[in-house]
Image (cartoon, rainbow, N blue to C red):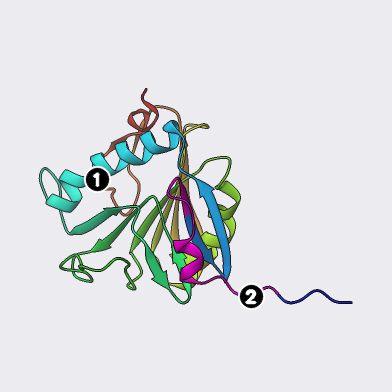
Amino acid sequence: MGSEPKRPATYEDLEAIPPNCVGEIVDGELYVSPRPAPPHARAAFKLAGWLDGPFDDGEGGPGGWLLLFEPELHLSGNALVPDVAGWRRERMPVMPEVAASTLAPDWVCEVLSPSTAVLDREKKMRAYAREGVSHLWLVDPLQHALEVYRLERSRWSQQGIWKGEGLVRAEPFDALELKLGVLWSR
């Protein structure tokens, strides 16, 4: 007596998720996570704030990016919600006025938490690689660590791991130094 095959998750499954949770579909499977805890939310907020002026607005930096906080991405049957994502302006000159983007970002950042780290490091990293996302950052606010990856020949190549409070130049935003300790500030 074999069990019935599991049906692929649908957008209707996402709509049924309670508002205090985040839902994603990765490789046909529904993942439901609690809303981020304060260290996770703070790190994502501080990172987005650091990137906004110089890279999105071009104030005190090179500009050229359109950055979004928790965008919904509909890519090849997946519904992904990275913590922060960015598109080079030549690929997305104007922010679309739709609920979800079907254009893969050029950069994504996932802030790791105990409930999402395995999903972020495994299935979501593979999905981002398949979609051709050029750069990926993993921020771990509990370990005070930043991991930076570049996509090379459809595989992630680690460009560096930084821990603690120091200054970092990390691609694709290496035009300016990031004070890593800002991400862990209380």
Q: Are marks 2 and 1 in contact (CB under 8 Å)?
A: no
Secondary structure at numbered mark 2 = loop
Which residue occupies the foreground of this view, 121 or 158? 121
Q: Which mark is residue 7?
A: 2
> Which dot marks residue 80?
none
Instruction: Categorize mark 1 by other alpha carbons within 10 Å: few (<14), some (14-19), many (20+).
Output: many
Camera-side residue: 177 or 76? 76
Residue depicted at 58% across the width and 44% down the height:
115
Is 28 placed left or right of 24 in the picture? right
Q: Would you place residue 180 above or below residue 119 in this image? A: above
Residue type (three-letter) at the residue carrying disc 2: Arg
Tell me what residue is drawn at x 36 percent, y 69 percent.
104
Image quadrant assignment for residue 177: top left
66 on left or right of 45: left
The answer to which quarter of the image holds residue 30 is bottom right
Q: Which stretch did the figure color magenta?
A: 6-22
Residue 71 shows in this picture: yes
How far from the left and from the top, in percent, is residue 55? Answer: 19, 50
Q: Can residue 156 be seen in this snapshot?
A: no
Separation of disc 2 and disc 1 at Cα?
40 Å
Disc 2 or 1, which lies upstream in sequence? Answer: 2
In the displayed structure, does residue 86 sit left or right of residue 121?
A: left
Q: Is residue 39 magenta?
A: no
Q: Which mark is residue 51?
A: 1
Is 129 placed left or right of 62 in the picture? right
At mark 1, the secondary structure is: helix
* Image quarter hosting the N terminus: bottom right
Which residue appears at 16% of the width and 68% of the height?
93
